[in-house]
Image (cartoon, rainbow, N blue to C red):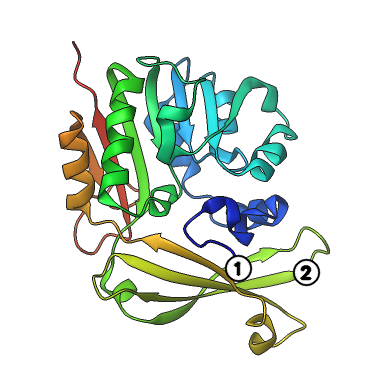
Amino acid sequence: MPDDDDPRQLSLYANPSRYDAIAESVSDDLLWWQQCLGTGPQSILELGCGTGRISLLLAAMGHRVIGLDCVAAMLQHARSKPGAAEVQWIEGDMRRLDAVDELSLGAFDAVIIANNTLAHVHTVAQLLDICEYIQRLLKPGGSLWLDCFAPSEDLLHPGSEDLVTYIDPSDGAMVQVVEEHSCDSRGELMQVRWYHCRADETRDQARAQPESMVLRLWQPGDIRAAAHVAGLQEVQACGDYDASPLDEESPLMLFRFRRPAD
């Protein structure tokens, strides 16, 4: 059985073309990153870069970009895209940054963790390790940017929703992604199942081939505490891509933390 704790074993990431098709249908974050990071040149590290959607955008804006991901198939797909030669692609696990020899300490103006990648980090200890190592990777005055879904009350209880519709790149068929989720008794780990429902099949048929993953429901306080212990100062906290303030009703958590200048 796949290990729901290891992104390298998730079937969602084994099909990069389909992953891209899903991501293209929910691309409202791209303007956010353009506005936050502006035109280059900055030295930027994206952790959990996937197929390079954001890394390639930032490179096209003139930044010097490294994209790191632990799934080889995703990186292979990223390397095949236009502009890929402008990005340095590294296979590595953000939960073990100390094992990634290609990363130089004090080298980055910005480190970003986008698109709910942080939810694959399951423990406070892992989060703290990541924040502490990022603090060492950043230049003095450099920033850590985080983008993750907020822990809404609905996610604490079993539920189902139509998540997104995309076009299957293999045959052009319309596909509806249905998400079912349930949370553990501590309100921390969420078991998620995705069903890809094609127009020519019933939802019961789609349920025969679920994609499962376990995601962490991070609280804003947990993220703030880990960043603080790591020596990072909070600069900004927004609740959506319109830069609205983060509050209990926010769908997203968008944080910026800064390493103090020496």
Residue 48, horizontal then vertical, whole percent? 50, 41
- The image quarter in which residue 203 lies: bottom right
Where residue 173 is drawn, which disc sits there? 2
Residue sitting at the far right:
171
Query: Which of the pair 152/206 is nearer the observer?
Result: 206
The answer to whether residue 58 shows anywhere in this view is: no
Where residue 33 is drawn, which disc sits there? none
Left or right of 117 on screen, residue 186: left
Residue 244, horizontal then vertical, whole percent? 26, 50
Report the residue at 27% width, 46% height from top. Answer: 125
Left or right of 241 on screen, residue 173: right
- The image quarter in which residue 194 lies: bottom right
175 shown above or below 110: below
Report the residue at 81% width, 60% height from top. Answer: 170
70 shown above or below 180: above
| CA distance separating discs 2 and 1 | 28 Å
The answer to whether residue 184 shows anywhere in this view is: yes
Report the residue at 26% width, 49% height from top. Answer: 124
Compare marks 2 and 1 and give the one earlier in the sequence: 1
Query: Which of the pair 202/104 is nearer the observer?
Result: 104
Residue carrying label 1: 1
